[in-house]
Amino acid sequence: MAAEPKKFDKNLFRILAFGDSLTTGNIGGELHEAFDKPYTIRLLNLVRENHAGTSFEVDNKGIYGELVCGEMSERLPKVLKECGPYDLVIILGGTNDIIEPKQGLEDTLFDGIKRLHAEVKGQGAKCIALTIPETDIHFKDLLTNGLSWVKEEGENIRLLVNDKLRRSVKGHDDKIILCDLAEKFPQHSLSAEDLDKLWSDGLHFTEEGYNKMAEIIYEDMKHLLPSRES
């Protein structure tokens, strides 16, 4: 017998954060939930502070090391079915895919991210589509010393996929909203002091960095949330 759909308070606005270790909030080093500082903590505080009268839930479904072209594509439909419904879904993926780029990855990664967006839209939720942030190829001297996880080929793919994402999101009205994290939260233009304050290892943020990430996402999604008057 099929399970009955979950019932939630009609006044509860449910947000799903879906992705990899940038969603779990890994701050570099040991992979352990106890050390994670996910952006969803700050995001929940922001929506509660600025949208009084509505109850919010932010459900973090990030998993370390996942690929868009692999686990994420298989997992998202299950999460939406088993844990939904959601009103809004934030999607971030692609960093792990470009660490070991394969031939044709530019197209398969872009298509994979688009399928994630379409899955959300098909479930009736709004989607916040994040671009892939800068990586450790820009971080200090890691590339020069051959220590960066992402190499030049992967970086070129990141740039191409992000450009495709920016163009593809146009025309979706308010069903799919672009949050250009790569543009709004760069590494290369930061001072050495800010780099150390916001980025931990070139792939992940510090706790303060994840708070900044939350603020960037909130600014791009706040018009989709219930207002004080509603």
Image: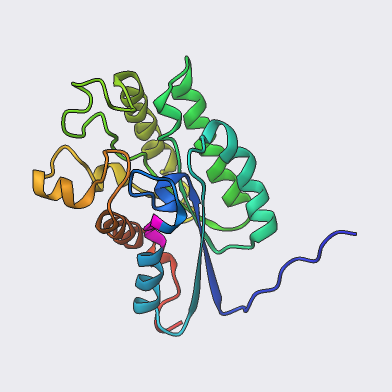
Vertical side of 62 occupied by 153: above or below? above
Point 58% across, 62% down: residue: 86
Q: Left or right: 118 with respect to 95?
A: right
* Rendering coords of residue 137 (x, y %): 25, 28
Question: Which quarter of the image is occupied by the N terminus?
Answer: bottom right
Q: Left or right: 178 with respect to 199?
A: right
Vertical side of 192 occupied by 140: above or below? above
Is residue 191 visible to the viewer in this orientation of the structure?
Answer: no
Q: Left or right: 114 with respect to 78?
A: left
Point 10% across, 49% down: residue: 193
Question: How many labels sit on residues?
Answer: 0
Is residue 181 visible to the viewer in this orientation of the structure?
Answer: yes
Vertical side of 23 occupied by 137: above or below? above
In the rendered image, which quarter is residue 83 located in?
A: bottom right
Please say whether residue 39 is one of the residues in the magenta stretch: yes
* Rendering coords of residue 127 (x, y %): 49, 53
Q: Left or right: 213 with respect to 54?
A: left
Please say whether residue 194 is one of the residues in the magenta stretch: no
Q: Farthest residue in the top direction? A: 103
In the rendered image, which quarter is residue 229 located in?
A: bottom left
* Rendering coords of residue 155 (x, y %): 31, 26
Point 43% across, 43% down: residue: 169
Magenta residues? Answer: 35-40
In the rendered image, which quarter is residue 142 located in?
A: top left
* Rendering coords of residue 121 (x, y %): 58, 51
